């Protein structure tokens, strides 16, 4: 695809994501914004590639990234990601360093639901005074590459914290479905990098300061036991979990993970509802639609936010 067409496709994807998000924002924020009012966010994200040229560890792809055909549900699905990156959505109208959250969209490690579980989430985070950073990790079928990508992303954010007006001790991860598994994996496996040191970025700490898992997948394969590689202990960061009982495929994993957090005395909260299913992002009209407000309250309780005055703009 010619370079001009690739940029046109990318801009179209971002514009459609923004248009749909603002059409539903009033509902999911439960009145926190007046109709038509945009949250405090930058007009465009800063895009940063994760790896120096020709130095990406692990397995990549030869083909170009692509957006899959629409299914009529207003979800942007991308795959064949060969150049992992982060999109940094900065909070506008604030002089104080903000918390930051690295957002991991879901998609069964095959695609990324890039707007519903990525850019829309970053915009919501901006509205409550948090820098939202959307991680575009390697898919399809590249779990080890994805894990290397999130490790590098955490280090890049810490390395650039001063330049991006971010508090370096308030950097969390947030994942949806497969992205929830990826975030849990980082939360329990931060003691050693999975790739050799490339530059000064890789001197930074890998441990996220907190984690938010929204309908996480793959946390348990055997009833009552965490999946291999998820070793919760007292160093696991404080965690907020969102799930519903009718997500039959994955609710058991969240319950096992919550029990492990409790046993390790890790601060946590579990917002559990009866209905909502799976894959709703910010778009649900069911009971689970309260999760953004519950998550915001938890972040305030943990000391990462200071209520509505998190931004100092007028």
Image: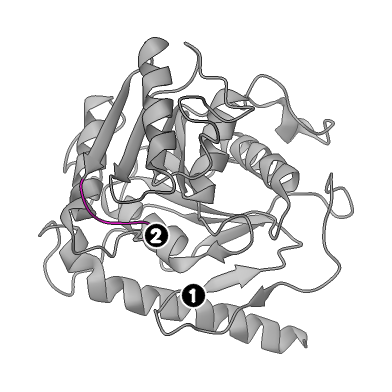
- Figure check: 148 above or below 60: above
Which picture quadrant has residue 116? bottom left
Which picture quadrant has residue 150? top right
Instruction: Looking at the picture, tell me which residue is in the foreground, 206 or 114.
Output: 114
Q: Is residue 207 magenta?
A: no
Instruction: Looking at the picture, tell me which residue is in the foreground, 294 or 271.
Output: 271
Mark 1 or mark 2: name the one nearer the start of the chain: 1
* Residue 161 in sight: no
- Figure check: 188 above or below 7: above
Secondary structure of the residue carrying tag 2 is loop
Which residue is depicted at the point 84% across and 51% down?
59
Q: Locate residue 64 relative to residue 168 in the image: left or right.
A: right
* Residue 217: % across, % down: 49, 45
State the quadrant of the N terminus. bottom right
Which residue is depicted at the point 49% across and 19% down?
236
- What secondary structure characterizes most of the magenta part? loop
* Residue 110: % across, % down: 64, 61
Q: Which residue is mark 1?
A: 14
* Residue 12 in sight: yes
* Residue 168: % across, % down: 49, 30
Secondary structure of the residue carrying tag 1 is helix
Numbered badge on residue 80: none
* Residue 264: % across, % down: 42, 11
Q: Which residue is mark 2?
A: 279
Which picture quadrant has residue 299? top left
**What stretch of residues is rendered in magenta?**
274-279
- Figure check: 126 above or below 192: below
């Amino acid at each position: 695809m010619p370079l001009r067409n690739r940029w046109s496709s990318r801009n179209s994807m971002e514009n459609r994501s923004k248009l749909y998000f603002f059409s539903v924002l009033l509902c999911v924020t439960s009145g926190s914004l007046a109709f038509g009012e945009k949250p405090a966010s930058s007009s465009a994200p800063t895009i940063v590639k994760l790896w120096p040229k020709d130095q990406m560890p692990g397995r990549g792809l030869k083909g170009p990234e692509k957006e899959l055909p629409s299914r009529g549900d207003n979800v942007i699905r991308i795959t064949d990601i060969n150049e992992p990156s982060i999109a940094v959505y900065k909070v506008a109208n604030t002089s104080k360093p903000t918390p930051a959250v690295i957002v991991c969209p879901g998609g069964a490690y095959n695609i990324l639901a890039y707007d519903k579980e990525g850019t829309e989430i970053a915009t919501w985070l901006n509205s409550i005074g948090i820098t939202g950073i959307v991680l575009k990790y390697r898919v399809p079928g590249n779990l080890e590459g994805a894990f290397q990508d999130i490790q590098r992303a955490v280090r890049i954010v810490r390395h650039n914290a001063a330049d991006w007006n971010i508090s370096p001790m308030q950097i969390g991860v947030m994942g949806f479905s497969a992205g929830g598994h990826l975030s849990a994996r980082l939360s329990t496996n931060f003691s050693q990098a999975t790739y050799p040191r490339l530059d000064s970025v890789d001197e930074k700490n890998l441990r996220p300061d907190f984690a938010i898992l929204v309908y996480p997948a793959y946390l348990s394969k055997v009833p009552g036991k965490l999946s291999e590689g998820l070793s919760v202990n007292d160093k696991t960061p404080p965690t907020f979990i969102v799930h519903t009982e009718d997500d039959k495929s994955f609710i058991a994993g969240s319950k096992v993970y919550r029990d492990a957090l409790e046993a390790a005395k890790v601060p946590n909260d579990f917002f559990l509802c009866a209905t909502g299913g799976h894959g709703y992002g910010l778009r649900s009209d069911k009971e689970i639609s309260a999760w953004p407000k519950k998550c915001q309250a938890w972040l305030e309780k943990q000391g990462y936010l200071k209520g509505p005055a998190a931004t100092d703009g007028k």
